Amino acid sequence: MATHMTGSFHLMKSLNRALILNTIRSNGAISRSDIAKKTKLTPPTVTNIVSELIKAQLVLESRSGISNGGRRPILLTIDSDSRYIIGVDVGVRKVRLALTNLNADISMRKIESMPSQEHLDEKSFIDFLQEIIGNFLGEVTDEKSKLIGIGVAMHGIVDHDTGISVHAPTLKLENVPVKQVLEDAFHLPVRVENDAKALALGEKWFGAGKESDHFVCLNVGEGIGGGIILNDELFHGNDSLAGEIGHTVIDSDGPECSCGNKGCFQTLASGYALKERTKEQIKQGVETSLTDKIGTDMDLLDGQQIFESALEGDPLAKRVLHETGEYLGVGILNIIHFLNPSMIIIGGGVSKADLFIMKPVIDSIQVRALSERAKKTKIVVSELGEEGSLIGACTLVLSELFSYQHEHK
Ligand SMILES: [Zn+2]
């Protein structure tokens, strides 16, 4: 197992190999001569390296190109099914697992419930993670030698170099050495990243961000996380804190946040904030069809019900979703003025209600942005849907496999 796996990463110690492999990946299907033109490498160099990549089962030949009268050219594509990756998305209440190929196509998936908070500490959390990944691996029927790594997307602040979950506030966990423990247990390379950053990377490789060099991806769920792609790469900042847009203060007299500050962006625009505002209105006696759904038990209220009631025309549900869109617009406007990205991608549970939230988001940017071009910043919903962070988790391993390895880590 180790040879196949280490060999895959070892190959990318050549800059030219990485360049050619990525040219094939981003073009879908391409001939040797077109690779030479695009990379400005000589045709013999391309031929040699392509032979190595075919031998390593990273690239496939197919004769499906369009002929210009003569023989159809041989096109090269990534040999997607030659290797597999395990992706793990660790949320607050559930953990999603997936087995994907090199194109992030999911061939096997599973959802596990997170143990309840009172039973969770650093040790039991990592034991749990190890157990569910072990069980999942046990169910994989494909050749195990094809597995090249595990990518983990994790709520909270993650040091992506060491793979330590530094601070997971909602799970109340600190300094969990996720990478080290999983590498020791499974003898596979492990990459760990914050879930919103993983989502941004997934969108860059496989989703709405494919054509964009600078964009920001928001993961709007229980909280709000952000992933920043600058010059085609994830931006981490000095201390892995970049993108924590959910904790930028937009109303210093606003509701109290889990971080201890008041009026953070996520206390106003997250799924949690949406539920809290709705509950408050119901308590004040505002009439809504939501009470038919939840009775008197406010704890039963969830975002999906609010969305469904809004679809049925319930005025309260429509209003709270509209307000959420307005608050999102304020936070997004700040991002636009601060970073001037070409696009903002909205993912996470709240993005499912795009029918109600997108118009107020776009309206507020069109009214308030500083320049005509900034007013036209593209705002789109994630193309990867609720499995976005999971696909992002797999992309952590892919981006390592496809990138030039400067030195052995
Ligand atoms: Zn906060």
Image (cartoon, helix red, strand yellow):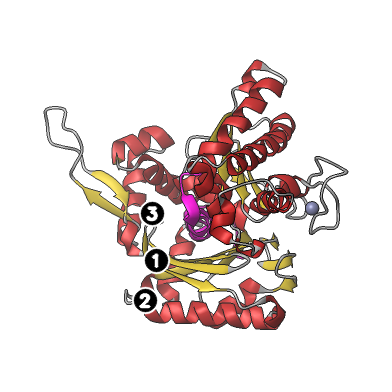
SS state under label 2: loop
SS state under label 3: loop
Left or right: 29 with respect to 323?
A: left
Numbered badge on residue 109: none
Question: What residue is shown with label 1?
Answer: 84
Check if mark 2's residue and mark 1's residue have beta carbons within 8 Å: yes
Residue 119 appears in the picture as rendered: yes
Check if mark 3's residue and mark 2's residue have beta carbons within 8 Å: no
Mark 1, ligand 1, within 8 Å: the answer is no
The residue under the point 70% across, 73% down is 176
Numbered badge on residue 140: 2
* Percent position of residue 207, x then y: 46, 44
* Labels 3 and 1: the sequence-earlier one: 1
Question: What residue is shown with label 3?
Answer: 103
Amino acid residing under circle 3: Asn
- Tell me the chief SS of the magenta region: helix
* Labels 3 and 2: the sequence-earlier one: 3
Residue lying furthest top in this view? 372
Q: Residues within 10 Å of mark 1 (few under 14, many from 20)?
A: many
Q: Residues within 10 Å of mark 2 (few under 14, many from 20)?
A: few
Give the distance between the C-alpha atoms of the residues marked 3 and 2, in whole angstroms: 18 Å
**Residue mark closest to the camera, 3 vs 2:** 2
Residue 198 appears in the picture as rendered: no
* Percent position of residue 235, x then y: 67, 46
Give whichever of 307, 131 is nearer the camera.
307
Q: Which residues are magenta?
A: 382-409
The residue under the point 69% across, 31% down is 336
* Percent position of residue 116, x then y: 64, 77
SS state under label 1: strand
